[in-house]
Image: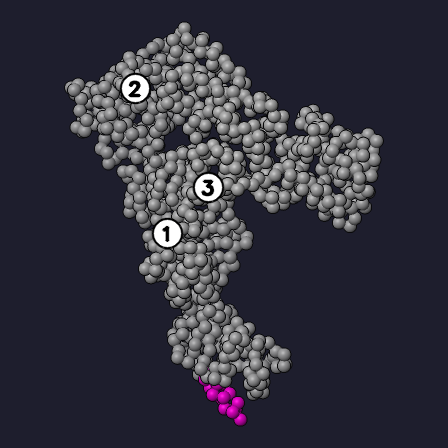
Amino acid sequence: MKGSEAKMTGFMEGADKRYVIPVYQRKYDWKYENCRQLYDDLKKIVIDGRDSHFFGSIVSAVVPNGSKIEYHIIDGQQRLTTITLLLLAIRNLITQGKVSSDEGKLDEQISQRFLISPWASEDDKIKLRPVKSDREALVKLFGDEEDYDHSSNLTINYQFFYDMVMKEEVPVADLYAAIGKLEIISITLDQGDNAQLIFESLNSTGLALTEGDKIRNYVLMGLPAQNQTKYYDAYWAKIEKCTANDVSGFVRDYLSIKQQVTPTVNNVYRAFKNYAELVSLPIDTLLTDLLRYARYFEKLLSCKSGLKEQKLDDCLYRLKRLEIVVTRPFLMEVLRLHQDGKLNTDDVLKIFLITENYLFRRNICEVPTNALNKIFLNLNKEIIRYDNTADDYVSKFIYALLSKKESGRFPDDDEFRLALSEKQVYQMRGKYKAYLFERFENYGTIETKDVYTHLDNNIYTIEHIMPQHLTPAWNESLGIDASEIHATWLHRLANLTLTGYNPNLSNNTFVEKRDAKEGGYKASGLKMNQKIATKQTWGLDELKERNDEMLELAMEIWAYPSTEFVPAEKEFDSCTLDDENYDLTGRDIAKYSYLTIEQPVTSWTDMFEHIVKFLHQKDKSVLMSLAYSSKEDTDLAVYVSNSESDLRSALQIDENVYIEKNTSTALKMSILRRVFALYEADPMDLVFYLKDSETKKASEANRYDIRRRYWEYALPIIQKQHFHRGTFSGCNPTTSNTEAGSFGISGFCICCIANYDNARIDFYLANGDSSKNKEAFDMLYKHRNEIESKLGIALDWDRADNHKASWMCHHLDGVSVTNEADWPRMAKFHAEWSDKICGVMLEYLLDDNEKRLNAIMGIFREWAQSHDETHLDIVKSNRTYTRFTTDGMSAILPDIPNAPSGWNTDNHYFYEILNRNGKTAYIQLAISSRNITDEFRAICEKINQYYPAKMGKYDWQWRIPFKTTTIDIDEQLDEAAVVAKLDLCLQEILVFESHLAEKLKQ
């Protein structure tokens, strides 16, 4: 094996060379940021006039092949491939005349020296041979642009270099010269060397430099040799001591403070380097500031504040035991403000204690912790921003925490009390369990016990007063409900205490535990056991009593803070992309913040466009790959395409990259969360600031009135469209933004939704059994292409695995329920599309018999609606019963106003067409006795004399005095034949009414 220093271009030059990427190597996967870094390094070579730049190593095995020499690249393929792409971009741009160089025929020079062998056969011209999956994409880059494989990472990175070179930020000849200054270590294996072993060795895990090591080297190696020891002793050695050699963790917190962005654990060095170059501080100034913050960091680690306040040091120790490090940037800033004279010691103590309470309450209430990093990262800035001062800092700090919502909330007393009461405390994580019992034992006394150490050393253990395994004596003591009491209370706080004598107490009876001379509750020196020792027995009443006592003490230990501070200007409501449960319905966005940079926007679509374009500029490979992938590859590909015509309302992100923007706010959030995951971006970094709901287009009261008036307008149109199915027949105008229609499948419905920023149709699968919803969704999704083809539109499909329900949506953007001019478009959209979507979906959800029953129902309704003699009540009709009245019967049985019948109507009768089995039908007269007058009852009794009903008794509720002849419905469901038979039934009704009227006159 031979190793030597070489120029990158020298390694690549030679018509007889071929560079083969072995099949065991991974695909080319350098990201946009890697290419950006290389390009920036080359620019610095030009601008700074550097003579060289180290570019890493390339390990290869030389394999002679006839007149060619093949270099099998064992390590370094990413660098080699990337330089090839850059050189190819330069060559193509010069050839196309888009950039020029003073150096004659530079494109031919690049091509023949580094890219191709001009005299080789056609399939052997390109010198670089990537793995098979990349090879075709590289070949196409040497051809016509329309043939490029835009889904390939090679093409994406080539396009990046193509775009950057074309900007000519540095002259192309200078850029080419800079490439020539890239130096590598070229390691060439001999024939006897084992390439596999060397590959494994290169990729094995050794003792790598930490991020802190790299930062130290960056800071000190740039100094003259005579100053390196001086600065190391004066600053760096002290920083390492203060941080207990966790320089990486400290610098990560330091950068969080300075930039309000927390670098990833593996990117601390690069982030620090970028920060140092950005601020351009003299090295001693930068190190002085680092050392200052390292001393604050030391106070948090050592739990010694140096402020002569024992309560503060005790709090520091408790926080350290909880191992929560996300608070460190904020707490370091609090210590800085104290040192700067802006906070006194009492202020610092209050802030630390409230922070402790906030963290513990959230843990007990099981509030997700993912919000904490961003909360404490920005908390100091948020507090100062209220009035641009540190005045009244504690009050503003309390206000800031209490104003958090959802995953950032400070649980109030009701939430905390209930959660702690029912918490399975014994099953909590050890550090929180130890913390809880230390607080209960030591709070409010200076005669403290070293609970932590005793628990660590197993001197103390957690004792179940009512034991984990009930003995006969305990069963008898607890009584008939022993099993239930045991299951409910065993691991709860009320049944737990501390003891140093757990084996002695074991499963003994309560009296034995209480009175044991060694370790009994009466003999215990622990404060927690004093009250237990006064009890005569231990059962449900004692558990409830102790529970209440401990909850009252908990409210004192972990007190909920209060403040009278109110900002001069009302703050925007805010949430992050990570807050999935935050209801954005009807909320307008005022601005957003991403990576601490705020940007005002006019709409959710505006924000969506900004963020997607920003992410795309950071790494074009993500959306480019999606745009050229098939819908079957990922559900996100439905919303991203390389063709504008594939989407309903396409937003152009880049050339040949489009994303769907005609979506609801909720779906935009869903798409962004999935995009963020692909970019490995933190959704907590994207914060939305929402317009005050009181200053929205309408006040709350007006908003409800607007919705009610819209549904008064739209519902009749929707109901008319669904007349044959009766889907919305039971709906009335409401103040909600949603009207839901049913179609006879339990839990499934079709929803019409009227929002401030769009109108929407949801086909909603919300059965109480989640598995039924997912099963139905999966079945429909298998037929997605058929369904969307029948509808002529693409739907938004959301299985929503984290929710019980699933749904499919269709949207109409550019309309608002607040604008009455939009109502006709919205109502037409709601009516027509809810009917179309419902009709197509039911083809897959209903069996043949259900479809037949629905078709018969439609015929019956059309028939009842079409006759002058019959008056259909569609609201009171369903698939089994089609109900109508007639003028003749209404003359005999008139309406009784304000006296609701069994159907909740003024009329107390209906003719009902019964559709039970889809084979036969008849029409019956049904009468309800609910709330009838004596006069009406007398008429009914006369009717019963002439047409006796089965329910003939006086206290009847329903009577059926008349039925028509039963008609048969043929298999073919001939509508004309069914209508003709119903017409005969109507004749029977008219004859019946005529005869009845005559008899009642007698």
Q: Of 119 and 978, which appears nearest the observer? A: 978
- Judging from the image, what secondary structure is the residue with disc 1 in? loop
Residue type at mark 3 is Pro
State the residue at coordinates (38%, 59%): 830
What is the x, y in percent for residue 984?
Answer: 43, 81
Query: Within the image, what quadrant is residue 547 found in?
Result: top right
Instruction: Please say which color scheme the image uses.
Output: one colour
Give the alpha-carbon distance from disc 3 to disc 1, as whole Å.
30 Å
Q: Which residue is drawn at 50% across and 35% down?
A: 392
The quadrant in which the N terminus is found is top left
Q: Which of the labelled discs sits on residue 757, or is there none? A: 1
| Left or right: 407 in relation to 752 | right
Q: What stretch is highlighted in magenta?
A: 989-1002
Q: Check the image and report above or below for 521 versus 173.
A: below
* Mark 1 and mark 2: Cα distance apart in space: 48 Å
Q: Main secondary structure of the magenta part?
A: helix
**Residue ID for mark 2:** 44
Q: Which of marks 3 and 1 is nearer the N terminus?
A: 3
In the image, is residue 888 above or below residue 489? below
Q: Position of residue 427 (x, y in %)?
A: 65, 37
Q: Where is residue 137 in the image (x, y as percent from the top left)?
A: 30, 31
Q: What's the residue at 81%, 46% (across, down)? A: 476
Q: Considering only order in the chain, which callout, 2 or 1, is on the residue closer to the N terminus?
A: 2
Q: Disc 3 marks which residue?
A: 567
